[in-house]
Image (cartoon, rainbow, N blue to C red):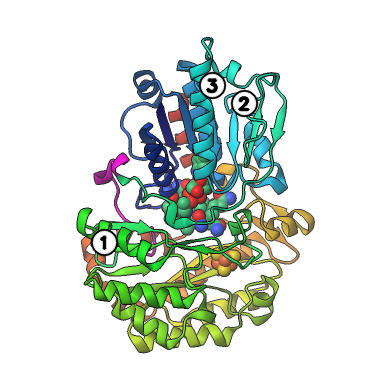
Amino acid sequence: MRVLLINPRFRLPIDTRTSPHLGLAYLGAVSERRGDEVRVFDADVEDQPLDEFVREYRPHVVGITANTPQVKQAWRHAAQIKAVHDVPIVIGGPHPSVVSENLDFESAQNPNVDIVVRGEGEETWIEICERIEDFMRDQEDYSTKALMDPAKGVWDDVLGITYKTSDGELHRNLDRPAIADLDSLPWPAYHLFKMERYTNLQPATDAVDGSKSFSILTSRGCPYRCTFCSQSIMPIKWRSRTAENVLEEWRHLVVDLGAEEIGVLDDSANIRKKRLHELADLLIANNLNHVPWIFVNGIRANLADYELMSKLKQAGLRRTAFGVETGNPEILRSIDKNIDLDTIRRAFKVCKEVGLETIGFFIIGLPGETRETMQDTINFAIELDPFIANFSMMTPYPGTKVYEQVKRHGRLLIQDWEDYVFFEQKARYEMGEMTAELVEEMYRRAYRQFYLRPSPVIRRIKTKDFWLNLPRNLRIAARTFIPKAEKTGLRKKIEAEALS
Ligand code: B12
Ligand code: SF4
């Protein structure tokens, strides 16, 4: 069966370094294992127009991924495809998975979308492909309309989907349980991507030395439920791959694909410390510790003790991120992070002692904040003094507790899903005495107060990456320190391109 997987075009209004979409790489891998012919169309890096590509390839099923700012572009892509080819279109990803806000229905009722996959996708995707294949085999009058005919009942018992039958009715099937054995998954199919067109791991936090980098996912999920985090839409159960299974993929990335830097994308990689000790031992024993790697997304500070961090350092870990979020104890309690400031202090101290670079993620404008609490955050960032401090303005994503709070007690300043990005230097909501003006002022102040000190400047210019990517780094600095009007032009440009 011919399968097409699409990442909708959505360049961020910063110099985002693109990386292959890991979710699609996993879906591509399970589809190939099933025997499908698979193509990935990453609209961020393709030259060919999508409709032309579809006309040539004539897929039997199309899967499109969508986070919140991508979803409208996903619908536009669906329309482009249906205009040239009759094919079932499936949408998945973090945005349509938000059942509490009926965002599965929102996508399913789009005239060009047939099926929505909620949550983790691999097993559901396989079942969808199987159903379509069986249907094509049995039906001479194969068409999407026939496939979605309620009388045929093709989709009645497929777990984890929401779909629209050809009479226009929406159906939400039961959830699919989280994948129990992550070791059973194949490695992400990077060969489906035009790898030479990608740059690096993450916009603000990557590039140990501007090297060729790959991502890896060693665990899924997070047992915590911080009020601002979209993790809440994924399974609560934290599951991990075994150290041996991770080692084999790690070896593949280094030996076969030539990775010079690896970014571990887990939400909370250190929930089970023993597993990381085992992985570190294996990386050392297999001489894979010469390739630097980073915990890109933050590990839990309460589980980052000296023994673990020094072992990981020996295993090649170069830099680790922590979600610090705030420097005010009351605000920290209110976001259900389940941590205190002293624990965070200890984690940063341990990292410095063992010689690890740190990244601190901080949020400006959490519910209940005042000028003073936001200043506490800036002061705490300066006290912790991470190698990189990343401040973002609170953006309430649907499905999170903060979204609920803002809907109930505040005022959302964005109406369009495409504006749900947090790099545009614009406050996204107001609540109580916390005005947009105040949050934007404190956000700019955070960057100025943190970075316009001698130590971060010296640290930064001592890195290879700074000089290798000088124009880009200067542009980011200019954009960060010199306030600018919102780049609404970005959205208009994408829309114009999609319609042309
Ligand atoms: C790495 C990452 C990035 C990277 C790369 C993104 C990329 N191309 O993958 C960068 C830094 C560029 C990035 C940017 C942003 N990100 Co981001 N990112 C992540 C992160 C940490 C890991 C993504 C990942 O690889 N996951 C692992 C794979 C296996 O999971 P997956 O991609 O979700 O795919 C699975 C399922 O969702 C599903 N699925 C997905 N698509 C499809 C499609 C079909 C057809 C099917 C059947 C199933 C399916 O099946 C997949 C396999 O199980 C996640 C957190 C997380 N845990 O996922 C946040 C996350 C996805 N990002 C998030 C956000 C908010 C953003 C930004 C909007 C932030 C901003 N700057 O404003 C931007 C948007 C950028 C863009 N271009 O779209 C939110 C999304 C929330 C939401 N409601 O949309 C998340 C969930 C973080 C969080 N916990 O809040 N991000
Ligand atoms: S912020 Fe981190 S710890 Fe909190 S729920 Fe999200 S992934 Fe888990």
Q: Determine which of the numbered discs, if any, sits on residue 251 in the image.
A: 1
Instruction: Locate ligand 2 by image quadrant.
Output: bottom right
Whether the residues at callouts 3 and 2 have beta carbons within 8 Å, the answer is yes
Residue type at mark 3: give it.
Phe
The numbered mark, 3 or 1, whose residue comes first in the sequence reads 3
Q: Any atom of ligand 1 within 8 Å of the CB at mark 2?
A: no
- For the residues marked 3 and 2, what is the alpha-carbon distance in whole angstroms? 8 Å
Is residue 127 shown in magenta? no
The numbered mark, 1 or 2, whose residue comes first in the sequence reads 2
Residue situated in front as seen by the camera: 89 or 130? 130
Horizontal side of 30 relative to 232 (left or right) equals left
Residue 160, visible in the rendered structure: yes
Residue situated in front as seen by the camera: 331 or 82? 82
Give the main secondary structure, helix, strand or loop, of the magenta stretch: loop
Q: Which residue is mark 3?
A: 135
- For the residues marked 1 and 2, what is the alpha-carbon distance in whole angstroms? 41 Å
For mark 3, give the secondary structure: helix
Q: Which residue is mark 2?
A: 154
Write down the region rendered in magenta. Answer: 191-206
Q: What residue is at 72 percent from the left and 48 percent from the top?
A: 100
Is residue 192 shown in magenta? yes
Residue 13, visible in the rendered structure: no
